[in-house]
């Protein structure tokens, strides 16, 4: 089954014949695509922080001796991940006019899905690692899959960095709107045995409290700051974080570790290390 136009008339012999031909074409394209080799990898071989940004790379290779016509991997209609056949991302929902291409013997096609690319993130359904710690996986529409894990982090240190922007908060239960200064959230955590510093791309307010749960894990706030950008991995426990901003809210971050190492990280306006 494929998507048909709204004005499709099942009683029109010409339209029925065209529809059958389109279904046969897509079935042929999908059969050909199953002959290809797919390798999917994520940008970390260790667990992700809850809500962390991520990249997925898809490498498609034609290992056969024949050119194969397949659904075009660069067509947005083919760019999605699925885990269940009942989801919208399924060959049965490919449109009649899906683009095709011919992949030559030995040809390699590489696609990169970046959760920070808003258009691609929406198209592929990849907004970053989930904020719920557990094991996950992506299955590409045309073939191949990859698994990854999100792990509970142990909070080591944190900082709220006041910004030069303000947000007015309204609520049906509050008669008077409240204006609060925005603040960037920075955390240092132990994650899968590593000591990691991250910054949230979404801001909280200066009154927000970054704190650990009773078991030492950082949970409350991971969704608020997400997506999170990993800034650095250091060799020992991070004992202190301080940060300041310039007039354009570019952050300068300083940290200290248990083994006496100090470091400084300068962030650009998108909160990536310079």
Image: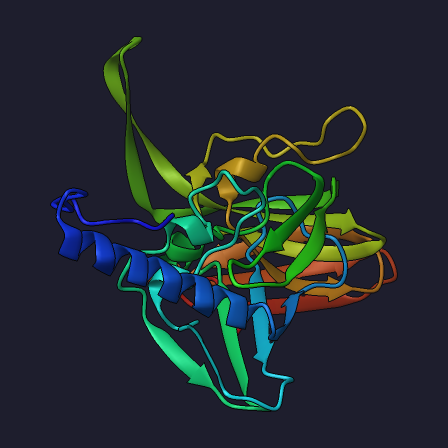
**Residue shown at 55%/59% (left/top)?**
140
**Residue shown at 36%/74% (left/top)?**
100
Q: Is residue 45 toward the left or the right of residue 179 in the image?
A: right
Q: Where's residue 189, x and y in %?
A: 73, 48
Corner quadrant of residue 258: bottom right
Q: Which residue is nearer to you in this view: 265 or 134?
A: 134
Q: How is the image coloured?
A: rainbow
Q: Which residue is nearer to you in this view: 21 or 48?
A: 21
Corner quadrant of residue 9: top left
**Residue shown at 63%/44% (left/top)?**
50
Q: Is residue 196 toward the left or the right of residue 97 in the image?
A: right
Q: Where's residue 138, x and y in %?
A: 60, 53
Q: Which residue is nearer to you in this view: 248 or 112?
A: 112
Q: Is residue 181 toward the left or the right of residue 129 in the image?
A: left
Residue 258 showing in the rendered view = yes
Q: Is residue 249 above or below residue 222?
A: below
* Residue found farthest to the front: 13
């Amino acid at each position: 089954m494929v998507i048909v136009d709204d004005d499709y008339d099942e009683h029109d012999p010409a339209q029925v014949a065209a529809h059958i031909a389109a279904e046969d074409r897509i079935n042929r394209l999908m059969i050909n695509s199953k002959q290809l080799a797919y390798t999917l990898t994520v940008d970390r071989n260790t667990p992700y922080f809850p809500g962390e940004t991520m990249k997925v790379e898809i490498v498609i290779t034609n290992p056969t001796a024949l050119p194969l016509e397949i659904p075009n991997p660069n067509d947005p209609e083919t760019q999605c991940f699925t885990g269940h056949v009942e989801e919208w991302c399924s060959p049965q929902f490919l449109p009649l006019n899906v683009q095709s291409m011919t992949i030559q013997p030995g040809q390699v096609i590489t696609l990169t899905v970046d959760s920070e690319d808003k258009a691609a993130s929406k198209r592929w359904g990849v907004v970053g690692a989930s904020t719920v710690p557990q094991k996950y996986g992506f299955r590409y529409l045309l073939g191949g899959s990859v698994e990854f894990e999100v792990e509970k982090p142990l909070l080591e240190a944190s900082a709220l960095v006041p910004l030069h922007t303000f947000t007015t908060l309204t609520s049906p239960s509050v008669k008077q709107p409240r204006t609060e200064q925005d603040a960037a959230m920075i955390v240092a955590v132990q994650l899968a045995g590593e000591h990691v510093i991250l910054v949230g791309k979404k801001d909280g307010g200066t009154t927000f409290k970054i704190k650990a749960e009773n078991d030492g894990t950082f949970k409350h706030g991971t969704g608020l700051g997400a997506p999170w950008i990993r800034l650095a991995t250091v060799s020992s426990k991070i004992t202190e974080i301080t940060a300041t901003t310039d007039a354009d809210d570019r952050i300068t971050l300083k940290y200290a570790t248990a083994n006496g190492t100090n470091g400084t990280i300068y962030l650009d306006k998108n909160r990536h290390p310079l």
